[in-house]
Amino acid sequence: MKTQATALILGATGGIGGAMAQRLHRGGWTVTALHRNAGQQVASDGIRWIQGDAMNAADVAHAARGAAVIVHAVNPPGYRNWAQLVLPMLDNSIAAARAAGSRIVLPGTVYNYGTDAFPVVHEDSPQNAFTRKGAIRVEMERRLATASTTGVRSLIVRAGDYFGPNAANNWFSQALVKPGQPVTTINNPGKFGIAHQWAYLPDVAETMCQLLAREATLDDFARFHLQGHWDHDGTQMVNAIRRVVLEENPTATVRIKSLPWWAMMAIAPFVPTLREMREMRYLWKTPVRLDNARLLKVLAEEPHTGLDEAVRTTLIGLGCLVPRTRSTAIETVA
């Protein structure tokens, strides 16, 4: 994609939407973002805010005029009414992309897959999800695949559990640490010996942008897997958090304990976010690895920020860590 192309972001205040907005702006794109309260958003990172609702087809179509790319990163906060809202919002993006000639970029997950695809998952592995969110993810991709047969191009980059400095709705910020509070206890949802896959959001955004730069070579329905950070024994992430905190504050006391799943089970029926997190517990009981061989054939090397630097930047962004003298700049290896 040439510079000065326009990208529309749906979900720019979220983790991956915000990371994509920043990266696209740095790459010379004109970035617009749809928001229901556009007038209250601070003009930053070169984003032009447009008033509108992702549930309103006319609003999305209007915002997408002239856009080469629509980044569909919008999700209901806290998973509220997820089943009722997610598919209509995607349908609106598909209709807008058809009218504008845009490519849709969708951040993907491992939720699409069931145990028949484990432990190493490829882009074409069968998608037999057995959770509600997984079934919705499968249907989202099915609709994009169908749309690609009638001229609507899409790019899906699937990754492990997201974490990053501006992402509040994920396992890192909802379970491992508490945003806005110093880290004294780290809750580990997994078990020793059970590997887990993580994805640092700036790396995900960098990968997507590098793929978009190869627009002419992409399939109309293009799918790639990101390896991200492979926690080979289920302790690498929590140990990195403790290590980073102690580097900044050597006198701190930081303990690691198992996530109290029993407590989550008890209150989950009354808390939508916990209810949805409980549904995905199976991913902490078995190692699931997204294979990135297809991505490496295209990019040769996957963008990757070192784990400690990614964790440090994330903790600072979440208000869990105050750096003493170290720069907080993100260094990404392309």
Image (cartoon, rainbow, N blue to C red):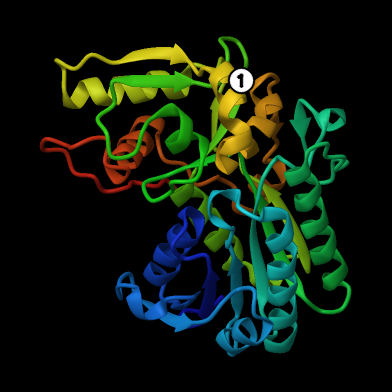
**Where residue 168 appears, x then y in whole percent?**
43, 46
Residue beneath disc 1:
195
Above or below 218: residue 40: below
Q: Nearer the viewer, residue 11 or 229?
A: 11
Q: Nearer the viewer, residue 147 or 137?
A: 137
Give the residue displayed 26% in from the left and 41% down from the top. 319
Question: SS class of the residue under badge 1?
Answer: loop
Q: Nearer the viewer, residue 238 or 263?
A: 263
Task: Point out the image quarter for the N terminus.
Answer: bottom right
Give the residue displayed 88% in from the left and 73% down from the top. 149
**Where residue 190 appears, x then y in whole percent?**
57, 18
- Specify whether residue 190 is in view: no
Above or below 68: residue 276: above
> Would you call the spot at circle 1 few (<14 residues within 10 Å), some (14-19), or many (20 or more)?
many
- The residue lying furthest to the top in this view is 192
- Specify whether residue 327 is in view: yes
Give the residue displayed 83% in from the left and 32% down from the top. 117
**Where residue 260 appears, x then y in whole percent?**
52, 17
Q: Is residue 198 left or right of residue 246?
A: right
- The residue lying furthest to the front in this view is 270
Q: Nearer the viewer, residue 333 or 42?
A: 42
Give the residue displayed 11% in from the left and 35% down from the top. 324
**Where residue 249 appears, x then y in whole percent?**
16, 23
Above or below 251: residue 298: below
Q: Is residue 83 left or right of residue 305?
A: right
Type of the residue with mark 1: Ala
